[in-house]
Amino acid sequence: MLKKFFLNLLSSFIGAWIALVLFCVVAVVVAIGVAVRLGASDEGGRSTKVDSDSVLLLDLSGTIIETPETGQIDFASLVMGSGVESPTALNVLIDGIREGKESDKIKAMYIKCGHPSASPATLNAIRQAVADFKKSGKKVYAYADAMTMGDYFVAAQADSLFLNPGGALEISGLGGTSLFFKDFLDKVGIKMTLVKVGTFKSAAEPYISNEMSAPARAQLDTLYGNMWRYIGEAVAEGRSSLNDSSLNKAADEFIVFKPTSEVLKQGFVDRLAYERQIDDIVGRIVGKDGEDVVYYTPEELSDNSDWGKAYGSKAKVAVLYATGEIAEHSKSGIDCYRLVPQITDLADDDEVKALVLRVNSPGGSVFGSEQIGEALDYFKSKGKPFVVSMGDYAASGGYWISCTADCIYADALTITGSIGIFGLFPSAEGLVKKLGITPQTVSTNPGRNISLFYNPTQEQLDVLQTYIDDGYSRFVKRVAKGRKIDEARVRQIAEGRVYDAAQAIKLKLVDKLGSLDDAVAYAASAAGLKDDKYGVAVYPKYKPDFLDILKAQGLDQLNMEIARIAGENPEGILIRETSRMLRQSPWQARMAPLYIRFN
């Protein structure tokens, strides 16, 4: 018995030691991989060996963001054993597609539709990159089990479009839903006090009303209508079997519930096929059997590109990303205390000959917007060209930081404008009474403090309104000076109203429709740089951290990203909006949160 005990004990020790040794071996292998990748990053990036007669695989799925972000572990997801997607970076996708177009080893593109989570302007940028890829004469094929409008907007550029016989095509228009919280806040005893300038400045309406105001609804009707018309025309350009009214007809007829044979008959797709057949279909393009087709993703091809990585160039155009809400001391979005030093460093760097600010922001803090604006004025004082490229949004504070650029480019589906300011102040006087709490305040200057426990007085509101009016005047003057428009005219077109890019061009708020590449080319030309005599460097400089590289090594069980609240989930939006309301600065130059998705 004792002998058996010792044998079991010995086997346990041996098993533990073997496990420890194996763990150390795996750890060493991972560490070497991490060190190699970090070293490659320090040396300007790694490269991907591309086989001849290969295919570029564009996977339209998951969340698409502007530029790579450093990963974070989602410990809750780890505990639950669930995985979280890692967002795809738009600039990496575009760079990889460009590289695929120029590579003589890439013979075609295969778009695999998978319900991307992205705003229309982001999808339009990808659509245009696919159209540019086709100019090389290379074929583009696309397939979907089931196709959303976001998928279709991009995939309509394909030479051949395949749909699963058991699938569906979802076309139901463009729109968004806003939740209004006034009744909820009344029930819990919270009163929101709003001071603002701008008839159309509707960002705070959900907290003070139970329904959308007439001006807010009118501007969205116009905005969505203009964007939807552009989308219909863009799809018709890619599909000769359709016209610019085909999408409206399909949406009105609930084509999502039609059999796929009807989708085929109406010319929305070219063929019904199962996914297992696609490799053989694509293989015929490159002269290979289906199982021998080699696919490369845009991310892999981007490794072979020098775009955005010319940090050592003696003459470079800096592309600086400003994405998210503008705030102070924020770990996400645009933190003015991080962005301002970056701008001044670029201004003082003699090797930086021009700046392209890539703006994708609905605005935010007035203070943060002013600090960034002043830093950009400093950059311009150095005599260097300053150009703006607008993404999904460049509104309110996002427009504040854009309006003094020498030239402003926007995507056709960019939302901009929203020139206005508001202040939103919560009061819990009703809540504390419901809880049986009686606040008692002693002050040397009674009535001069705006407290969470009391509703603001009329005298306080008058002072706050004067403060908002002054901030609005500064905003208007900045736009008038930057855009060389009469101040009275700016006041006419401001009022917090949002515009699509085509409207904005007519109003001289934007100069041209174009991509980030177009903005970079303009900046280089304005700086007197020849095509082959300058580099492009992207800032903030992205360097993958330890966790990001672990994921790149294939350890997907380590989540690198905190999951974003998805889609139009009401509970998620309520949590997000309440959290933001309590955290944000009371003084905001921010557009209404538009969760624009294809319905």
Image (cartoon, helix red, strand yellow):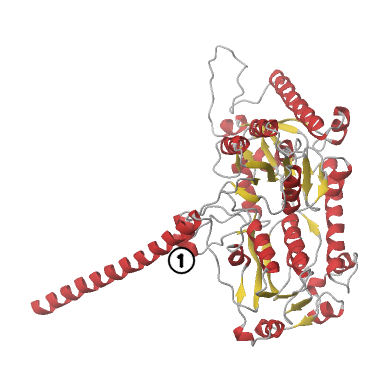
Q: Quick one: quadrant of the N terminus?
A: bottom left
* Residue 77 appears in view: no
Relative depth, front residue between 428 and 140: 140
Label 1: which secondary element: loop
Tell me if residue 66 comes above or below residue 399 in the rendering.
below
Q: 153 above or below 109?
A: above
Q: Residue furthest bottom?
A: 289
Within 10 Å of the Cα at label 1, are there few (<14), some (14-19), or many (20+) other Cα atoms? few
Q: Is residue 30 rendered to the left or right of residue 200? A: left
User: What residue lies at 76% left-to-right and 70% top-to-bottom?
Assistant: 136
Q: Position of residue 515 (x, y in %)?
A: 75, 53
Asked whether residue 108 is in view, the answer is yes
**Residue 492 position within the rendered picture, expressed as x and y whole percent measured from the top left:** 88, 33
Question: What amino acid is found at the position of numbered circle 1 in the picture?
Answer: Leu
Q: 25 left or right of 442?
A: left
Instruction: Choose between 181 and 273: the one closer to the eye.
Output: 273
Where is residue 170? Give x, y as percent: 77, 69
Q: Residue furthest left?
A: 2
Q: Residue at x 58, y 66 (%)?
A: 300
Q: Quadrant of residue 7?
A: bottom left
Between 383 and 415, the residue placed more toward the observer is 383
- Is the C terminus in the top left, top right, bottom left or bottom right quadrant? bottom right
Q: Which residue is mark 1?
A: 555
